[in-house]
Image (tube, rainbow, N blue to C red):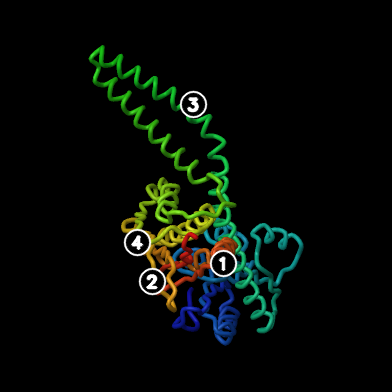
Amino acid sequence: MTAVVGSDKETDVKRILVVEDERIIAINICSTLKQYGYNATYVSDANDAIEHIENEHFDLVLMDIMLNGPMDGIEIATIIKKTKEIPVIYLTAYSDEATINRAKATEPFGYLIKPFNSRDLYISVEMAIYKSQVQKHIRNVESRLAENQKWETIALVASGISHEVNNPLTSILNLADLIALEAKKLGSNSLQEKASKIAEESDRIAKIIKNLVSYSQSTSSQWNYSNLGSIANDTRSFLHQYFLKEGIQCEIELGDVPLAYCQPQKIKQVLLNLIQDARVRVNTREDTIGRKITVILKQAEEEGTSHILIQIKDNGSEDLMKGISQMNSLEVTKSIISEHKGKMYRDDAVSSWFFTLPIIKPL
């Protein structure tokens, strides 16, 4: 049996599934939730509960532990936990230690002991939904911070391993040449093709290592006049294999811009952070075709002063966490731009990050 109380006209209305086999209790709970602005659906058995959770979105499940049928609420919650990140609050008239210990294994967001009043219900629901949102946000941030740390680790390791990798690669290329010569003498086209393929793949590995080493070369403490187009190309090359794998097209539109007086490695970090953010956004697109990031560099005027304007534009969907806008890396990025006497801002209307660098002419 299924019934819906309330409406979902507003996009921010939280949806709650009540799993309760006592019809009168379920209706009363749903009516109370409606009074507090929630949308509530109730079901009375395990199969209906599982079907609803698999096919619809809910922000919270209020789960009666004791249900009629082959499964109780704890068993249903165990199934939910394997496939969905939905907070569960248990409703129970039984608070014995054995039941509580079974319930603990499903990591519920709370317990309500029957009978409970409307205020207790409201507080428990609000706290559970809030706690769930915070946990999701933390997981999202940790995941993205780990991604950024991965790039930093790759950059640090690249220089160290390049010598060890390049030596055997050189040997492989030499062996491939010898095999190709031997194959030519024997008239074996098949062997020649295989030797050519070995050489081709070895060259590809060498280019990847070269890009990594080039990108990771530390010049962070040095201020000099640098070509921003080259810095942007270096950053794109650093991410090329990932763009290739994810079907992302990354273009650079370079206008007539002067050399920028900057710390090149730090500007690389800014571009890396912002392009990484654009990568996250385009990967939210359901279709894998048409994912695109554009880096635009041009000279612009503001209040009679010229500066270099860099735009990182993507055609992705706006993710719920607003890309890096709530991450520590944003503060690092802003700090670098501020250190360079520039400005940085986000314009969601054109799905772009912008940052500026002042034009400083050599003495």
Q: What element carries label 3?
A: helix
Amino acid type of the residue that numbered disc 4 sits on in the rendered structure: Asp
Mark 3 near mark 1, Cβ–Cβ under 8 Å?
no
Q: How crowded is mark 1: few (under 14 residues within 10 Å), some or many (20 or more)?
A: some
Read off the residue under disc 2: 350
Q: Answer with mark 2 or mark 1, whichever residue precedes in sequence.
A: 1
For the residues labelled 2 and 4, the Cα–Cα distance comes to 22 Å
Looking at the image, which is closer to me, 50 or 190? 190
The amino acid type found where label 3 is placed reads Asn
Res. 263 visible in picture: yes
| Inter-mark Cα distance, 3 to 4 | 41 Å
- Name the secondary structure under disc 1: helix
> For mark 4, what is the residue?
256
Do the CB atoms of the residues marked 3 and 2 lie less than 8 Å apart? no
* Mark identifier at residue 338: 1
Distance from the alpha carbon under mark 3 to that under mark 1: 42 Å
Mark whose residue sits in front, 4 or 1 = 4
Mark 4 and 1 residues: CB-CB less than 8 Å, in contact? no
Q: Which of marks 2 and 4 is in front?
A: 4
Task: Please report the residue visible at 69 percent of the width from the left and 80 percent of the height from the top.
Answer: 120
Q: Report the front residue among 170 and 189.
A: 170
Labels 3, 2: front one: 3
Neighbours of disc 3 within 10 Å: few (<14), some (14-19), many (20+): few
Seen from this angle, which residue lies furthest front? Answer: 363
Nearer the observer: mark 3 or 1; the answer is 1
Q: Residue at x 56, y 65 (%)?
A: 334
Toward the viewer: 362 or 323? 362
Q: Position of residue 341 (x, y in %)?
A: 54, 67
Quadrant of the image occupied by residue 160: top right
Q: Position of residue 44 (x, y in %)?
A: 54, 71
Residue 9 picture location, percent across and down = 44, 83
